[in-house]
Amino acid sequence: MDYNLFPVFVEIMRHQNLSKAGRALGMTQPAVSNALARLRDQFGDQLFIRASRGVIPTQFASDIGADIERHVEELKLLTQTQSRRSVELSKISRRFRLVAHDMEECLILPQVLAELSNVAPGMQIEVRPYNRATLADELTTGRADFVMAYLRDVHKNLISREMVYQDFVCVCRKNHPEVGKRPSLKQFVRLNHMIVSPDKGGFHGLVDEHLMEKGMSRNVTISVPHFLTACQFVARTDCILTLPRLVAEEGARAFGLHLFELPFKMDGFSTSLHWHRRLDNDPEHAAIRELILETLKKEVPGRQN
């Protein structure tokens, strides 16, 4: 039995999609498919069957899923404990470069930086903006030690650990003249929309792709690069804005926005902590990433355990 394949099983069970499992593991979809084929041979069961939007587990996979996930987490904890033993965080005097999207800067970095400054005061953290065009080069050349982001692209030699899962909701200004408690789909597409497009810009996003599948489209009138800026704008206009849930909750608190559910179901996404494979056995890097993940487990709602 090849126990190294168990994390692949866990991520496929978690996402029920080979591409998403690959992104969480830092693997290509063909590599995930190959690992799944080996798992099927070892267990003598199909484990996962193709469905319209991914895969669904067989009864056998469902029966063994919880046990396998528990064993993977126990092995992970054992590895993390060993890395913590070998490094005293208070003695680290090194600069780490952390790449983060605007969203992660708002939701995750405040808690992480506060904890790091307490336990590793001799360490320097340089936060760099996420740039899709240069990210692969930054990881390869060592100009990025950690990346906090949802990555749509597949990157070679990247290891990933899921941090936070979010679905999508909408916000608008309070007392919006056309939005009640929860507008219908017809009302939703008729309203003016703002979009956050931090990577490529433009007026088309995940919501538009979902609506196209239904033969519908919406009226996007404003496109901005930053999440909290978008919340400020929405508070002063009659646009509505679709956001990841935790960002929407933060924006609603900060700017007095009305938050409501989408009038249709749409898949969410996971923000993960990523690093290049060459850093995986670096004891100081391992100790810092363990601390980051432990901090998020305690401090950030929606953290994946």
Image (cartoon, helix red, strand yellow):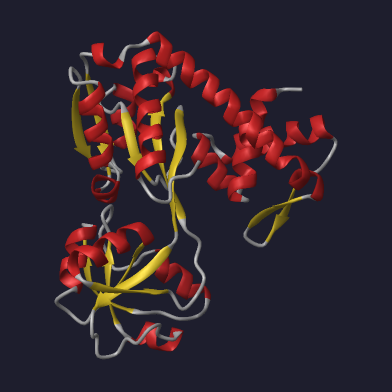
In the image, 156: left or right of 65? Answer: left
Nearest the viewer among 53 and 161 is 161
Specify whether residue 47 is in view.
Answer: no
Determine which quarter of the picture holds residue 40. top right
Image position, residue 118 (x, y; %): 22, 26
Residue at the bottom extreme?
A: 177
Q: Residue at x 75, y 40 (%)?
A: 64
Specify whether residue 133 is in view.
Answer: yes
For residue 154, above or below residue 78: below
For residue 127, above or below residue 81: below
Q: Residue at x 76, y 22 (%)?
A: 1
Residue at the top extreme?
A: 86
Image position, residue 254 (x, y; %): 19, 63
In the image, 148: left or right of 231? Answer: right
Image position, residue 152 (x, y; %): 42, 48
Q: Residue at x 37, y 84 (%)?
A: 181
Q: Residue at x 37, y 64 (%)?
A: 205
Nearest the viewer among 259 and 18 is 259
Determine which quarter of the picture holds residue 7. top right
Residue at the right extreme?
A: 44
Image position, residue 119 (x, y; %): 25, 23
For residue 12, above or below residue 144: below
Total numbered labels: 0
